[in-house]
Structure formats: C-alpha cells, structure tokens
Amino acid sequence: MTLQMILCLAILIFMMVGYVVGGKFKISNGAVAMMSIVLISFTGILPAKTMMTNLLPTSSVQIIGMFIVAAGFSRTQAVKKVTQMVYKLSGGNFTIMLAGYSLLTFALVNLGLTPMTAFAVVGPLAVTCCADFNVSPSKMIFPLALVCIVGCGVLPVSVASTTYVTNNGYLESYGYTDYAMQLLDPMKGRLPIALIMMVYAIFIAPRLCPAQASQEISFTEADVKAKTKKREESAPLDPVREILGYLIFILTTLALIFQNQLGDYAGWQIAFAGAAVVMFTGVLTPKEGIKAIPMRIVLMLAAAQVVGGAMVECGLGEVIGDTLAGVVGNSHNGYLIGGLFFLVPFILTQFMNNSSIGHIFTPIVILTCQSLGCNPVGPLLLLYAARQSAFWTPAATGTIALAVGLGGYDQKDLIKMSWIPSLIIGVIGVFWIMTIFPAFPG
C-alpha cells in the first residue's frame, strides 16, 4: 500500500470509529464528518477543486429541500385530526384500535417524521386509549414501535423520496456508476416486508407481549410530552397557509414521483422549489426553515463523498473491494451476498445507532459489489432492512428506549417479542430483495 492509501485508510477508520463512539465523548457525528473532510484536505489526497464539488452535491440539496417541505407539512393540523379520527372509528375494539394506530404510525414515518418522533406522537395517545379500553399498554406499545421502525421511509414520499438519490450519490462517490437506484426501488424492495410486519404487529405481536407490565411504567402521557417537547408549540397556521402546507407537500411529492414525465427537471430542483415556496408563503418562518435543515446528515453525506472520492483517487477503494470480495469467496450466489450484508449490520444495529451503521456499511457494500462486479441495489436495500430491524435492546434506537418506558418491558420481554419479526424480516427480505434485484442480472 502507498502512503496515501495508508493515510486514507486511517481517516476512514477515524470516521467509522468516530460515528460509533463519538457520542460517549459528546462529539457529534457532524463534527466527526467535518474533521474527516479537513483531514482529507490537509493530506492532499484529493485536489481542492474536486473536494469543493463533493462538499455539496445535488443529492444534499435535494435532501435539504425535502426536509424543509416536510417541516412545512408538520406545521399543519393533519396529525392531530387523523389521530382524533382513529379514536372515534375504533368503536371499543382493541384490534381495530391497534390497526388504526398502526396505520397512523405507518403514515407518519412515511410523511417525514422520524420513528422516535412519530412514536412520541402516537405512543402517549395509545396509552390513553388503552386506559379507556381497560387494556394494559404492554399489549400495544411494542407492536406500534415495530411498525414505527420497520415501516420508516418505505414509501417514496417526503424525505424518503431522497433515498435513491443518497445511494446514487454514494455510488458516484465511489466511482461505481454501472448501476443506479431508481426512485421506486426502495419501495419495491421493502414495502412487502413492511406490510407483512404490519399484519404481524396487529394480529400476532400482541399475543407475545406480556399481559401486564413486567416493570413499572416509567412514563405517563404527560411525562412523554414533557420529554419530547423542547419548545412551546407554535401557533396554528392561518387557514390559507394550512392549505398551502398540504398542497406544497403533495405537489412536491407527486413531482418527484413523476419526475421523468415532467421533462429535464432534476430532483434537487423540484425539492428546492418546494422548499422555496414553503418559505416564501410563510408556512415556515426563516428560523423554522433553518432548523429543518438536517446539517448532521448533510455533513455526513459530504464526508462520505469526500472520503469516498479520496479512496478512489488513491486506489484504496479497489484494494478494500478486492479484499472483501475474497472474503465473500467471489461467490455468484446473490442470496449469500445479500444475506451477509443483512446479518452483520443487523447484529450490530441492536447495540449501535442505526444511522452510524448505514454510514459505516454503505461504502463497504458498494466497494465489495464493485469488486465482484455485481448489482449493489439489492445489498444496499438489505442494509436498510437490517437498520430498520433495531428493536432487540433499548440501545438499538430511541424508539425502543421510549417503548420500554411506555410498555413497562424488561430485556427478557424484548427478546421474546423480537425474535420472530427478526426472522421474518431476514428470511423474507433476503429472498424477496435479491430475487427482484439479482446480484448478477441477465
């Protein structure tokens, strides 16, 4: 290995380790990303002009735009109105109530809310309904958390519409442009799994939940609201801006879905135009718009592209890909390749932040597939499926940490409730995704 390869490898390891352990030292992932960019710059692995191109790619612009559009939608009264409707339609039937809240949860995590935010909205309301129906919250909370985590970002709307852009940005960064992910590919791969898990959560999961809380329920509805509400609620929008919030969100999402039919408009143009209209019409204030920009995600994507470009520039990417391809054994069995890239991240995501898992394994997946000459779309989608299977421990995701408090679960409960959905996601996910996105098409 050359000196530049060694330096680049050291920076890559620094970035990976920083994402995993930085939080323990109060160092954010965004700060780790920025330092990685600086280190690449000062080692001279990438020319300055190339670095500037990688710092704000079109994929980042599209992500920024969609987060602002989603924030504009969240300022409307849609969530509150739908929640009230679910309560009325349940009619005192627990299964119907759970189905209603599951559908609401699925909608929220596909309309721009993170799983933890959506769960913080639905969870307390579900606890209140359980009290009204004289049912223990422990029978309902984990199934809703399951829907929250597995169903997140399945539909190509809101922020999830940028999934394919992000992955294509990674593919371009690592110089592997033989394949590209399309807008609807994530939905094609993950929607059947999400629907199966929805049915499981409604009809089967409650049977494996404890009849009563195993430990004291540490969060009441008021407690959860107090912990998740860090600022006073904004005043409701006036009727005109309320309607604009709905229309801008719907039209931007539809424009992204039918982008190819609209002409030569790029995805970033559509998303950024939607964001501009949200700000211009006053659906969001300038302060709210700035807060909606996910700088941590933008910085991490920029770092991935800069480090990825450096790996290609110095030849390290080819070396790593060849090495990992050797581990796979140059196998042409797509199910084996896909299973490997599901299993390892799945195990790690039970103990680590799933976003960090994604940023760590995405380049590994791409470089390995590049070395094997296979289609990376399936393995990348299985990496997403593995990340959305983080429900075995409270450390896996903030959603489960909150669910433990709301449902009164202990670790034994979590293991009992988690192994069957994990098996379903793993087996069906690998078979389905690697069948419709074969590693070696044709």
Image (cartoon, rainbow, N blue to C red):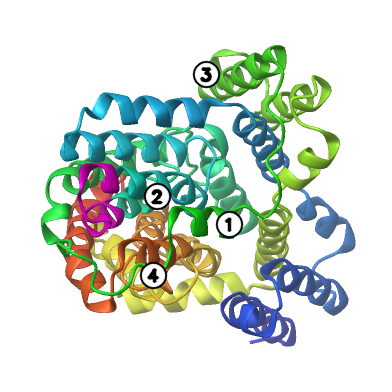
N-terminal of the pair, mark 4 or mark 1, is 1
Estimate how packed mark 2 is, as few (under 14), some (14 to 19) or many (20 or more) residues with alpha carbons within 10 Å: many
Label 4 or label 1, whichever lies nearer to me, is 1
What is the CA distance from the residue labelled 4 to the residue labelled 2? 27 Å
The amino acid beneath tag 3 is Phe
Q: Which range is magenta?
A: 130-143
Residue 163 % position (x, y): 52, 44
Above or below — where is 94 with respect to 43?
Answer: above
Disc 3/disc 2 C-alpha distance (Å): 34 Å
Label 1 or label 2, whichever lies nearer to me, is 1
Per the model, the C-alpha gap separating discs 1 and 3 is: 41 Å
Q: Which kind of residue does numbered mark 4 sit on?
A: Pro
The residue at which mark 2 appears reads as 123
User: In the image, what residue occupies the spot 71% across and 50% down?
Assistant: 231
Q: Earlier in the sequence, mark 4 or mark 2?
A: 2
Residue 345, disc: 4
Name the residue at 30% across, 40% down: 102
**Residue linked to disc 3:** 258
Identify the secondary structure beneath mark 2.
helix
Our reading of the magenta stretch's main secondary structure is helix
Residue found at x 33% / y 29%: 86
